Structure formats: C-alpha cells, structure tokens
Amino acid sequence: MEQVLRLVLFILYTLCCMIDGDHFRGGIISWRPLNNTVTGTSTQILLHQRYFWYRLWGSFPAPLCFESDILIQRPINVSGATLLCLRNCTSSNYPTSGLSANMITSDCDTSSIIQSWGGERYDTLTMPLTTSITIGYTGSAWMTTLWKGFSGAWAIVNRMNLAPRPDGYINSSPVTTTLPCILYQRGVPVVHIVQMADNDGTDILQCRWSNSNSTYNYNRNDECGSVCMALPPPYTLTGSNCTLTFTLTVANKYYACALQIEDYYDSSSPNPMSSVPIQFLFYAYNITAGACATAPLIIGVRPNRACIGVPIGVQLNETVQVQTYCPGQTIVNFVTSSPVGMTHSAISNPSSGLWVMTLTWTPSSTQLGPQGFCAGAMDNSSLQSAPWCITYLVGYDSPNLIRPTLVQGSASPIGTVFSNQSLFSIQATNAVGRPSRNGTNICFHLDTTNASVLCYDAGYSPNVIYTGYTIVIVTTITWTPGQSYYVTMDNGFASGSVFCHAESLAITDKTFWRFDIWNPALSSTTTTTTTPPTTHTVTSLGTTTTSINTACTTSGIVVTSTNASTTTTTASTTPPTTAAPTTAGPTTTGVTTESTIPVFYPLDFENACKQPVAIMSAVLMVAFMPIHTLAMYAAFTKFTNMFKPSNIAAKARHQQRMKNILRR
Ligand SMILES: *[C@@H]1O[C@H](CO)[C@@H](O)[C@H](O)[C@H]1NC(C)=O
Ligand SMILES: *[C@@H]1O[C@H](CO)[C@@H](O)[C@H](O)[C@H]1NC(C)=O
Ligand SMILES: *[C@@H]1O[C@H](CO)[C@@H](O)[C@H](O)[C@H]1NC(C)=O
Ligand SMILES: *[C@@H]1O[C@H](CO)[C@@H](O)[C@H](O)[C@H]1NC(C)=O
Ligand SMILES: *[C@@H]1O[C@H](CO)[C@@H](O)[C@H](O)[C@H]1NC(C)=O
Ligand SMILES: *[C@@H]1O[C@H](CO)[C@@H](O)[C@H](O)[C@H]1NC(C)=O
Ligand SMILES: *[C@@H]1O[C@H](CO)[C@@H](O)[C@H](O)[C@H]1NC(C)=O
Ligand SMILES: *[C@@H]1O[C@H](CO)[C@@H](O)[C@H](O)[C@H]1NC(C)=O
Ligand SMILES: *[C@@H]1O[C@H](CO)[C@@H](O)[C@H](O)[C@H]1NC(C)=O
Ligand SMILES: *[C@@H]1O[C@H](CO)[C@@H](O)[C@H](O)[C@H]1NC(C)=O
Ligand SMILES: *[C@@H]1O[C@H](CO)[C@@H](O)[C@H](O)[C@H]1NC(C)=O
Ligand SMILES: *[C@@H]1O[C@H](CO)[C@@H](O)[C@H](O)[C@H]1NC(C)=O
C-alpha cells in the first residue's frame, strides 16, 4: 500500500515537473515606492515582474501564444509560479504565501529561433519601512538547448530594503530592460551593453554576475541556479557601465546571462541599497553564405530612446521602420519587449530596403506612468539590429510648441528685429525641460537658400534655456540686415519636465516661426516697400518691461501696418544685460501663463540654476512616477545615443514630420 502511494506520489511529482517543463528563459524584478517621501512607518511599493518563457513548452494545457493572446491579455498560467520571500522575512509583512508570478501575455515571438513568450505584471504592496528582505522566484527548469545550465533549476532574486536612505527618502531599485534573446555570430568577439538606470539620479550603479554563494552575496541566497556565469570563458564584465565582452563558441545554442544590478548611495557605501536581477539569452548562429555584411537598422519613425507622452484610453499607432542594406535581405521577425496590450502588425515592405511594423496600443489607466517598448529586427540570415527602445509616458501630454502670432504671440521675436537680436523665446503647451538625449537641434535658416546659419543642440547647449512653459534661446551671431530667417526644431526640442521628458514634435515648416532683420539702409520716414523681408512699420522702439503692450510685436518694434516699412523714430532698444531687463511673457491660447523671464546669459544661467533646476526636476520626477519604473527608461539616461540617422532615416522621419505638421 505504502509502495503504491509512493509510486503515485512519484508519478505526480514527475507530472508536476513536466508541467513546469523546461521553459524558463529569464526575467527582471524591480520595484519602487509610489511616493518616496517618508510618511509614517509604512509605504506603498509597486513591484514589477517580467519573465520570458518558452513558447512551445510541451505539456502545458494550452501552450503556444499568438499575437491574438496579447489583445485578449491572456494570463500565462504556470503552476506554482510564486514570488516568495526568501531571507530575513520577519522584518516585513510580505505575504508568507508569496505573490503570484503569473504574467499577462505581452509578447509572442513565433520565429523559429526565438520562440519566446513574454509577459509582465505589477503588484502594489503596503509594507513597513523595516522591510529588508530577499524575494525571489525559483523553480525548474531552464530550457534544454542552453550551452551551460540546460534543464537546470532557475533562481531569480531581488533585494528589497525600505529603510530610509541617508538623504531621508525611500529608495527605488535600479531599472533595466532587455530583449528576451539577442543574436550574435558564433566565434566573433562581442561587446554587449546591458542598460541600467535609476530613478534616484545620484545613485552609483554597479552590475555584477549573479552567484550562488548564499553566505557571501548581498541577497544571502542562490541568485542564479544553474546559469551562474554561464557564458563561455574568457569573458569580462565591467560593472560600472555593465558592459560584457565574450565570444560565443557553439552555433545554434543559447547562452544564459544572469546579472544583478545594484545601487550604492555613494562611492564610499559598503553595501548596495537594492539588487535587481536581469536574466536573458544570447543565441549564436553561423553566418550563412551570402549573408549581408550589414545588420538591419531600425531608423524610426521615432528616434531611439525617445520618450512620448500618450493619453489614457486613446489608441496609439506607432510604426517601427527598418532599413536593410542588401538585395534579398528580408526582415523576417521582430523581437520585442512590450507593455501589456500593445499589438504588433505583420511586417510589410512598402519599398525596397524599407520594412515596417505597426504597433497599436490603447493605454489603460492602470498603466499610468512610464511604459517601455524595445524591438530588435532580424533578417533572413539571423542578423539582428541593435535594440531600439522608446518610453511611453502614459497619462501625460507631450508639450507642443505654440505657433507664433504677430502681436504678443507665443514666440519672440517675430516681425522685424535688429541685426544684433540675441534673445529668442517660444512657448509650449506644457511645462518644458531639457531633452534627455542629444540630437535635438534648433536651427535658424536663411529664407532665401534654406541654409542653416546657426544650430544649437538642446540636449546640452547652454544657449538653450528652459524655464516654465518657455524656452529661451540666446544667440551669438549678427544677423544679416535685410534678410529673412526661419526657425526649425527637431523632435524633442521641447520636452516635458517630468520623468523621461516626453517630447514635442518637430517643426520643419518654414512659416512656423520667422523674423526679418531690419535694414537701416532702407529706413526713412517715408514708406519703402521692400519685398523680402516682409517688414513692418516701425514707429517706436523699446523693450516692454512689465506690462504687455498689445501694440508691440514680440520684438518690441511696434506694428502699425503689416506690409510697409516705415521708420518714424530712431531706434533705441535696450539690449539684454546680465542684470537683466524682464521680458513680459507672451500670453498663449489655452494656457494663460504670463511668465516673466529673467534674462541671463547662458553661462550665468547655467551656473546659477543648474543646482535648483536639477533638484526640482528630480522632485517632480519622483512625484510623477506613480508607476512602473521605467523599464526602458533605463538606459536612456545613461547611455550614449546610439542612434545614427542615415539618409533614409532622415528622409523617412522628414516625411513623418511633414505628415504631422499637415495634420495640425
Ligand atoms: C489561467 O488561470 C486563470 C485563473 O486561475 C484562469 O481564469 C484562466 O482561464 C487561466 N488561463 C489559461 C490560459 O489557462
Ligand atoms: C533583517 O532585517 C532587520 C530589520 O529590518 C535588519 O536590521 C537586518 O539588517 C536584516 N538582516 C539582513 C541580513 O538583511
Ligand atoms: C562563499 O563565500 C565565502 C566568503 O567569500 C567563502 O568563504 C566560501 O568558500 C564561499 N563558498 C563557496 C561554496 O564558494
Ligand atoms: C566601460 O568601462 C570600461 C572601463 O572603464 C571602458 O574600458 C569601456 O570602454 C566602457 N564601455 C562602454 C561601452 O562605455
Ligand atoms: C558553425 O561553423 C563552425 C566553423 O565553421 C563549424 O565547426 C560548426 O559545425 C558550425 N555549426 C553549425 C551548427 O553549423
Ligand atoms: C490610430 O488608428 C485608429 C484606427 O485607424 C484611429 O481610430 C485612431 O484615431 C488612430 N490614433 C491616432 C492617435 O491617430
Ligand atoms: C536572404 O538574404 C540574402 C542577402 O542578405 C539573400 O541573398 C537571400 O536570397 C535571402 N534568402 C531568402 C530565402 O530570402
Ligand atoms: C527651401 O525649402 C522649401 C520647402 O522645403 C522648398 O520649396 C524650396 O525650394 C527650398 N529652397 C531652396 C532654395 O532650396
Ligand atoms: C498687405 O498685404 C496683403 C496680402 O499680401 C494685401 O492684401 C494688402 O493689400 C497689403 N496691405 C498694404 C497696406 O499694402
Ligand atoms: C542693437 O542695434 C541697435 C540698432 O542698431 C542699437 O541701438 C543697439 O545699441 C544695439 N545693441 C547692442 C547690444 O549692440
Ligand atoms: C508624497 O507624500 C508627501 C507627504 O505626504 C506629499 O506631500 C506629496 O504630495 C506626495 N506626492 C505624491 C506624488 O503623491
Ligand atoms: C551630448 O553631447 C555633449 C557634447 O558633445 C556631451 O558632452 C554629452 O555627454 C552628450 N550627452 C549625451 C546624453 O549623449
């Protein structure tokens, strides 16, 4: 009898483990407080889990996922999937039975190599500030085709410590993101950067190999099961920038990579404040004869690392465009990591060398905050593009620049100005801040030739100053008298001031913001008709100081008629000095902000305001971030912009911009 029972138990055990299957392929666990200010003795924590599974795992009741499962938000039911407290659990009220680790489907990759089923979930927990625990999801087994650790146990663990930091705030864990599977050619040395970022901007981030020494590692637990340091030696990992170097040795095998990303308060801190696991796959392929020498490149429509504000409940249509470089090179698949509910169209090939996938997504109110998307395109020889990631800031509108109008409009100056005009400003529909990436230019063009005479990269140029709803540009050139100029601005020139800085659309329209340079040679007390530039009757000059004079154009030159150029008085305009006259803020439609802009020269401003501005945006950022940390925001703040626009990219984006402009 006992033997029978044992047999039954044995069979049940085997069944259970077959149901669990050899299907684990990695994941990420991170968390952050909804509000990092200490109030009382507990706080609300938003916990984010994302895991990748094998799509074909055998004995699962309803295996396989398809694109349609994303739309219906199909749960991924894995028996016994639980995120448990593993160490020091008495310090917290974390549920002893754990939290479910069952995901909502977000990505189904049906390509023969990847076969990945990804999902994510969020949980909100109210926990005491004494919490200092290790949580993790352990089980069996990893996939069978791993180079090392195949069919072995998995462990993925995270350290959660809610004790107030030395600066008095509650910590947020680092955030990271990855594609589930990254393809590299066998036998070729690889440099792979794992993206990492932190909402606490001053933390020092380090990544390290996960290890299984539970008496020694910070989690006090096995962190990686069978896939500890599972890349073929020799390999290196530079912790400060999370850069891996290695060479994959065997083709058609997968290689698991298990890392912990940890945040230190400062360089003298002996211990990190949290530990975020990231586990994912590399795959090695033999290059096929006739493969293209150049991997495909994702060229937009949005630039890599863009951040875009999206409203709740409105369908978003985004296209991912890929450029290929060889005849016959076809894009066969996109590897993605998406927010829940984002669907991916079939791949189309509208023109030679250009491949398009459309994303549609209606963000729900439960997705408020930053939501990341990453994609990599794969061609018919398994060449994979570099990852392209964007962050959607759900529930937040991207700022848009307001089209200037002649009298007291949203931009200054327009109309006719002196050749020594050095101060320009434009208003947006939202509070704006500096974009978080480079390559966001504002350019001044000569109207006659379209040549750009002056460009500043708003990503870093001290000549571009963000203040409230207004952007001030301080120029250093002398304009040519009698010429007309117009201004263009790239995507993201104006960026929201919160979190990842949702971006404005580009302005390429010549008529959006123009100004003419007063030509003293043509001025007289009689009307002169000069065609280019379109000039205005100048009756008096002077800067407005505090009140708005509706007779004034934004340049301070009064307009009395719109076509003729007449000077009746001599010019006397007070140029800006560092002691700064104040310019009356333009009133705008909708938002009635009447800001007074103190005028400083760029360096003064930088020095004076760097500190407070940085602090303010950090506070705002934290305040806004009630949601999911970022995921892909990750990378964006710390890594150099890998986006290299090609001609095609520029063309494609230009078309999109023109479309956007026409839509207005
Ligand atoms: C997953 O489990 C939930 C709740 O237990 C159930 O409602 C759902 O039908 C299951 N889904 C699948 C695909 O088995
Ligand atoms: C366990 O939790 C207590 C209370 O928060 C903390 O003081 C202690 O350092 C923790 N121990 C470990 C090993 O993390
Ligand atoms: C774990 O680390 C400790 C401290 O570094 C060391 O003494 C011990 O030998 C290690 N254990 C194993 C199994 O490597
Ligand atoms: C990472 O840091 C190492 C050491 O400082 C440096 O040699 C390497 O170039 C860095 N890698 C990247 C991608 O920045
Ligand atoms: C890949 O190429 C290497 C070297 O040419 C060869 O030894 C190996 O068998 C190939 N593997 C596969 C799976 O084609
Ligand atoms: C996206 O496409 C759908 C269907 O074509 C349309 O109803 C919707 O308005 C579009 N969304 C945006 C933001 O353009
Ligand atoms: C795959 O791409 C190569 C060029 O990269 C091309 O020569 C070949 O014909 C393509 N194969 C198929 C089946 O499309
Ligand atoms: C300047 O650009 C406009 C619109 O983009 C175009 O129509 C015009 O021909 C261009 N002029 C020159 C001189 O290139
Ligand atoms: C100003 O220009 C407009 C359009 O170009 C024209 O209709 C109008 O008559 C002009 N006014 C004067 C005073 O020249
Ligand atoms: C700018 O030009 C005007 C008119 O020529 C002149 O009155 C003014 O002093 C100049 N300002 C500066 C700072 O040179
Ligand atoms: C965070 O908590 C503090 C203190 O209760 C409060 O002043 C602040 O408004 C909260 N922030 C958010 C975004 O709720
Ligand atoms: C932007 O460019 C500036 C100047 O070249 C450089 O110092 C800065 O690090 C760059 N920032 C980013 C995010 O690439």
Image (tube, rainbow, N blue to C red):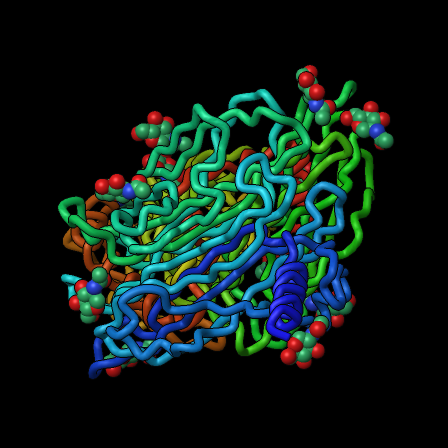
Compared to residue 153, the image places residue 615 above or below, namely below
Residue 570 or residue 496, whichever sits in front: 496
> Which quadrant does the C terminus fall into?
bottom right
When asked about the image quadrant of residue 603, the answer is top left
Q: Quadrant of residue 80?
A: bottom right
- When asked about the image quadrant of residue 96, the answer is bottom left
Q: Is residue 579 left or right of residue 337?
A: left
Above or below, 558 against 463 in this view is below
Residue at the location (45% across, 26% down)?
A: 233
| Depth check, front residue: 472 or 441 | 441
Residue under the image location 62 percent in, 58 percent down: 118
| Viewer-closest of 341 and 268 | 268
Q: Position of residue 223 (x, y in %)?
A: 39, 51
Q: Is residue 130 left or right of residue 155?
A: left
Q: Position of residue 654 (x, y in %)?
A: 65, 44
Name which residue lies at 50% across and 52% down: 154
Q: Is residue 490 visible?
A: no
Which residue sits at x=67%, y=70%? 315
List x then y, in percent, for residue 542.
Answer: 28, 58
Q: Is residue 580 left or right of residue 519?
A: left
Residue 4 spot, x, y in % from top left: 66, 71
Q: Quadrant of ligand 11?
A: bottom left
